[in-house]
Image: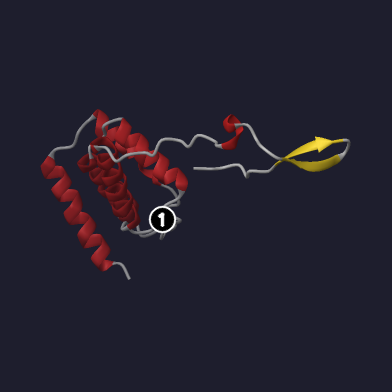
Amino acid sequence: MLTIPDTVLTMDRNRCSPSPEPSPARRRIPSTPEVTASPIRDAEDSYVTELLRAYLDLPDTPSRARTADRVLARSLFAQAVPLALVHAAFDVACVRRLIRPATASPLGQIRSLHYFLPVVEELRLSPPDPGYIRHIRARLAAATSRRP
């Protein structure tokens, strides 16, 4: 809780002088109620942590999440996007990046979680078959094991 000192300065003809007794209403600033943990907040924090950990473990992603990445992860939680769908979108996007013609110019590093948003929306509108996701993950594992 924030408190105001017992001596409050008042202006008196261009100079400050302490006033001896501040009013009780000005003496204390009400504190904001402490945020208590709730099951929804815990679920959101868990979702965001898991999503960002998976994102940062992907190839060509930054070493730490940005604030915008956290905001997007919270937004995905609020939209009730399943983590399994986000993981599948990560895999699909990574395979698309890795399995390219050898003559294609190399792609730059992924700088934001927003890079995956179009794939999340694609899979959200048309959920993939679990067999397809297994196939994509096998392709991803094979492609990353061959990379230097």
Element carrying mark 1? loop
Quadrant of residue 53 within the rendered picture: bottom left
Label 1 crowding class (10 Å Cα cut-off): few <14, some 14-19, many 20+? few
Is residue 62 toward the left or the right of residue 94 in the image? right
From this viewpoint, which residue is outermost toward the left?
A: 131
Query: What percent of the width, then of the height, locates residue 30?
Result: 50, 34
Q: With respect to residue 28, does 102 lie above or below?
A: below
Asked if residue 100 shows in the view, the reply is no
Query: What percent of the width, then of the height, locates residue 89?
Result: 27, 43
Q: Nearer the viewer, residue 12 or 142?
A: 12
The residue at the point 17 percent across, 55 percent down is: 138
Quadrant of residue 29 within the rendered picture: top right
**Quarter the C terminus occupies:** bottom left
The residue to which callout 1 is attached is 104
From this viewpoint, which residue is outermost toward the front?
A: 20
Q: Nearer the viewer, residue 118 or 72?
A: 72
Q: With respect to residue 110, does 89 lie above or below?
A: above
The residue at the point 26 percent across, 49 percent down is: 91
Query: What percent of the width, then of the height, locates residue 11?
Result: 81, 36
Asked if residue 115 shows in the view, the reply is yes
Is residue 39 toward the left or the right of residue 62 in the image? left
Which amino acid is tagged 1? Ala
Q: Nearer the viewer, residue 39 or 115?
A: 39
Q: What colour-coding does the image apply? A: secondary structure
Quadrant of residue 127 within the rendered picture: top left
The residue at the point 31 percent across, 58 percent down is: 57
From this viewpoint, which residue is outermost toward the bottom?
A: 148
Query: What percent of the width, then of the height, locates residue 71?
Result: 41, 40
Q: How many marks?
A: 1
